[in-house]
Amino acid sequence: MQAAVVLMRGASVAGKTKTKLNSHLKAEECAALDKAFLKDMNFKLLNLKKSCSKLELFLSYKPEQSPKIFAEVIAKDFIRIPQRGESCGEIMYNAVTEAYQKSKLPVVIVGSNFPLLATDTFTEAFAGLKERDIVIGPSVDGSYYLLGMKKPEESLFYFKDWRKQSILEKTIKAASQHNLKIHFLPEAAEINTFKELLRLRFELIGKNIDSNYLKNTRKIIDELFIY
């Protein structure tokens, strides 16, 4: 399996990260949880790289946040590329394009707000790109958690309205209009609300511990629910 994975990220900043959890958690706790998600995604992708014939890893970070901020969270294996563009779609398209130009490989773009994603999800995405033009991992909110393509497809990113509840539908429609064949991955849920955090806690308690276990996330959650 050969591919490039772009992890889209901003730094975990108290007061600006996981703000929907502020109803139950302090700003510093939200930032710590977000950083734990990122750490675990870092280890998951590093483990995945060991099993792939060629996997290039990229971190797409906000330019106003120095890449040094991520030094203790993201391994040096990830090539740092600053985010460029005005809209969300433009930023993502530029990240995909730069990763493709540097790696000359199919590109998969993903965030870290879906900590329960298994490495099998990524291997299925890579395999899907051998038979299809793009791969989409739908999220329950009407968006997607993963988007993969054999080469940059500008039509999938430039929409006038970039609302989560409609972006999946618009992406599928754009792909159809340009005769792009799609491979769909299983649906997944983002972790942004306290209810979703409770569900994640329950999932982690019942999961077997292996090299991809979310140990950083579990540690933070245990600390949050200790009282």
Image (spheres, rainbow, N blue to C red):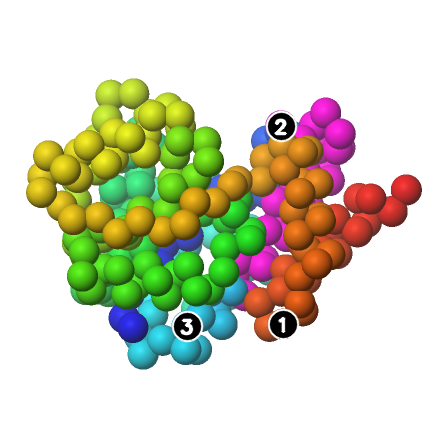
Q: Residue furthest top?
A: 161
Residue 20, numbered circle: 2
Which mark is first along the chain, 3 or 2? 2
Of residue 71 and residue 1, the one placed in the foreground of this image is: 1
Look at the image and say whether residue 27 sits in the magenta stretch.
yes
Say if 134 sits above or below 56 in the image. above
For the residue labelled by badge 1, is the local secondary structure a helix, a strand or a loop?
loop
Q: Position of residue 196 (x, y in %)?
A: 63, 37
Q: Residue at x 71, y 48 (%)?
A: 201
Residue type, label 3: Lys
Neighbor class of circle 3 (other Cα within 10 Å; few <14, some 14-19, many 20+) is: some
Residue type, label 1: Asp
> Distance between the Cα atoms at labels 2 and 3?
33 Å
Q: Residue at x 51, y 41 (%)?
A: 189
Which of the 4 image quarters holds residue 179?
top left
Q: Assess whether mark 3 and mark 2 are in contact (beta carbons under 8 angstroms).
A: no
Question: Circle 3 sits on which residue?
Answer: 49
Q: Residue at x 26, y 60 (%)?
A: 128
* Badge count: 3
Which mark is first along the chain, 3 or 1? 3
Residue type, label 2: Lys
Of residue 142 and residue 43, the one placed in the foreground of this image is: 142
Which range of residues does the magenta coloring cover?
A: 20-43
Which mark is first along the chain, 1 or 2? 2
- Side of 96 where 216 appears, left or right: right
